[in-house]
Amino acid sequence: MAEATGSPPQAPPRFDRAALSDFAAAAFGRYGVPDDQARIVADGLVFADARGIGSHGIVRLPVYASRLEAGVVAADPATSVTKVASGALSVDGGNGLGLAVGTRAADEAVALAGETGIALAAVRNSNHYGAAGFYAERAVAHDTILITASNAPPNMAPWGGKTRFLGTNPLSVGVPAGTEPPVIIDMATSVVARGKIILADHEGRSIPEGWAIDPDGRPTTDARAALEGAVLPFGGAKGSAISFLLDILCGVLSGAAYGHHLRTLEDLSTQQDVGHVFIAIRPDVFMPMAAFRQRMDDIIGMLRGVPPAPGTDAVLCPGDVERARERESAETGIALSPDVVAQLETLGHQLGLAVPAPRRH
């Protein structure tokens, strides 16, 4: 007698990118976020989903909404930009939504680099700024190299430690090219973004060993224990040092909070005061832009020409995987877990908004 087999797991529902962005923008509007800022933040969230970075996608909408409702984030912030040197800007985010504050700061840095060749914007009094690659993509569209980083609440153990001190402090670099797509590096300084562990916990999945430790400092594959413990830095001591440096630049230098002074997104009792940095560089101050593009295509071609290791199809350039996911999501829709959909439905019910219907397969 044949053994009974369970029914195959259902594929997650998939949604149109524009529809998700419209829903998120409308939700922010209900809290008094100006239309232009609501759209930027919504687009930044679904940008992450479309590129397979679900940890920084629309899953964050409910907690952003909770912070707006609690009054610990300003819906319409009084963001100020002060030129403190010929190529340097100090930005006070006014405690606004991080994606809106970050976009303003990145655009200001790119504009100033148009005058000075290189510009740095240091941001204080901001909040979680989403997927760092969102800003890099905006800059390369203007023929500008962008280096950006943000600090984050202490959720990572430093090298040799068993309790939280460092943030998962993201770093992104975007470099324009010619016929090749731009180089886009977008990474956390942890082995994995903590949001991926949050997503695993939401979905009841275990996590790979080496991602995190439990509250006693022991390696764990349990997502809940990992969230109660600490994530680990990539590359051991090297990743730990880079994360520490980014906290210095984004927190200490900018005037924002740092180290144990930073508060989590889930703490609805106080402001976060997250800090960011944006360094914009115009390649054409060193050579004609056409020459730079040709040289970028040349080095990318060299990288792609390296023979692949056994078991690997090809050597990829930073940004290739995310662009492939974006193309796929454009064709099939953005997949959301049932848990995330349920959270959006709850929020939509509270705000009198209908969650978009899933695409038909």
Image (spheres, rainbow, N blue to C red):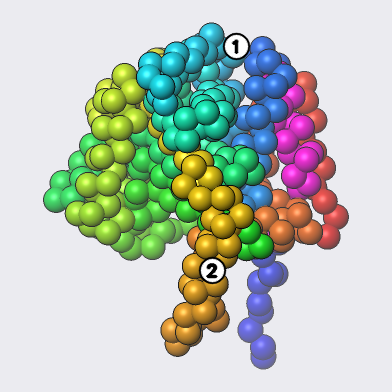
- Measured as percent of width and height from the top left, residue 37 is found at 65, 22
Per the image, label 1 sits on a secondary structure element best described as loop
Which-is-in-front pick, marks 1 and 2?
A: 2
Q: Is residue 188 above or below residue 164?
A: below
Image position of 53 (left or right of 25): left
Span shown in magenta: 11-29
Residue at image position (74%, 44%) is 17
86 or 17: which is nearer to us? Answer: 86
In percent of width and height, residue 85 lies at 38, 19
Numbered label attached to residue 298: 2
- The quarter of the displayed image where residue 344 is located: top right
Residue 283: mark in rendering: none
Residue 247 visible here: yes
For the point 59% across and 14% down, the residue is 75
Residue 11: x and y in percent read 71, 61
The one of 301 and 7 positioned closer to us in this rendering: 301
Q: Which residue is mark 1?
A: 76
Instruction: Please say if 339 is above or below 87.
Output: below
Image quadrant occupied by the N terminus: bottom right
Inspect the magenta stretch and tell me whether residue 216 lies in it. Answer: no
Most extreme residue toward the top is: 78
Residue at 40% in and 53% down: 192
Where on the picture, by quarter, is residue 219?
bottom left
Report the magenta stretch's main SS.
helix
At label 2, which amino acid type do we have? Asp
Farthest residue, direction bottom: 1
Q: Relative to residue 273, is residue 156 depicted above or below?
A: below
Which numbered disc flags the more N-terminal residue, 1 or 2? 1
Q: Is residue 16 magenta?
A: yes
Are discs 1 and 2 less than 8 Å apart at CB?
Answer: no
Q: 10 Å neighbourhood of mark 2: few (<14), some, or many (≥20)? A: some
Please indicate, yes or no, whether residue 198 appears anywhere in the rendered image.
no
